[in-house]
Amino acid sequence: MAASAAWCCLHCCRDGGTGHIPLKEMPALQLDTQHMGTDVVIVKNARRICGTGGCLASAPLHQNKSYFDFKIHSTVIWGIGVATQKVNLNQIPLGRDKHSLVMRNDGALYHINEEKSRLPANSPPQEGNVVGITYDHVELNVYLNGKNMHCPASGIRGTVYPVVYVDDSTVLDCQFS
């Protein structure tokens, strides 16, 4: 086995190849203006959402564990989570069907219109807070200003994208990593 691996490496170099295997570059993740509600406004290099409705990110979550967060500029009506491309981004709040799993502005996590989990009492996100989401293709976890809130939720299936929705003058900024 080791001899065949060495031969492959030598063969690559001997034939004028650099020996480097080109890596597939991951797409830059941002809010996707092709997958948003009709009354949504995306600004600031596709990093800020306002208006009314939802928006998916530009690429699905492929890693074993993904993280993204949103800074809250106003605390009226919003939701953050994951969704499939079949979600209706004009029908808010999200979390009402099998195509989305989101935490709403009151700190409750919804999927198929059922509350799956909730932030601890007296800890709903406030203006200026950063809400982080981790997702490992099974479980969604919420972080508030970097602190794990220990309120996991699961149930969504299929290829999912980060999703956010806003209404009533809410403004959120996103950061994907």
Image (cartoon, rainbow, N blue to C red):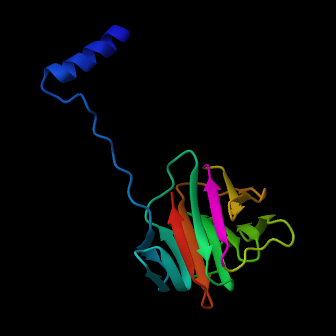
Residue 159 lies within the magenta run:
no
Specify the quadrant that holds the N terminus. top left
Q: In the rendered view, does 4 fall on the left or right side of 155?
A: left
Residue 135 lies within the magenta run:
yes
Count of numbered marks: 0
Give the quadrant of residue 97: bottom right
Q: Is residue 21 above or below residue 62?
A: above
Residue positioned most to the left = 16
Give the quadrant of residue 96: bottom right
Q: Is residue 114 visible?
A: yes
Q: Is residue 38 above or below residue 174?
A: below
Give the quadrant of residue 145: bottom right
* Residue visible at 39% across and 52% down in the picture: 26
Q: Which residues are magenta?
A: 128-136
* Residue visible at 49% across and 78% down in the picture: 48
Q: Is residue 20 above or below residue 13?
A: below
Q: Position of residue 44 (x, y in %)?
A: 43, 78
Residue positioned most to the bottom = 168
Q: Position of residue 8 (x, y in %)?
A: 26, 18
* Residue visible at 56% across and 44% down in the picture: 64
Residue positioned most to the right = 121
**Nearer to me, 164 or 177:** 177
Q: Position of residue 46 (x, y in %)?
A: 43, 74
Q: In the rendered view, does 10 fall on the left or right side of 153?
A: left
**Nearer to me, 51 or 96:** 51
Q: In the rendered view, does 13 fall on the left or right side of 106?
A: left
* Residue visible at 63% across and 81% down in the picture: 92
Q: In the rendered view, does 25 fall on the left or right side of 151?
A: left
Prevailing secondary structure class for the magenta stretch in the rendered image: strand
Q: Position of residue 24 (x, y in %)?
A: 33, 45
Q: Is residue 88 visible?
A: no
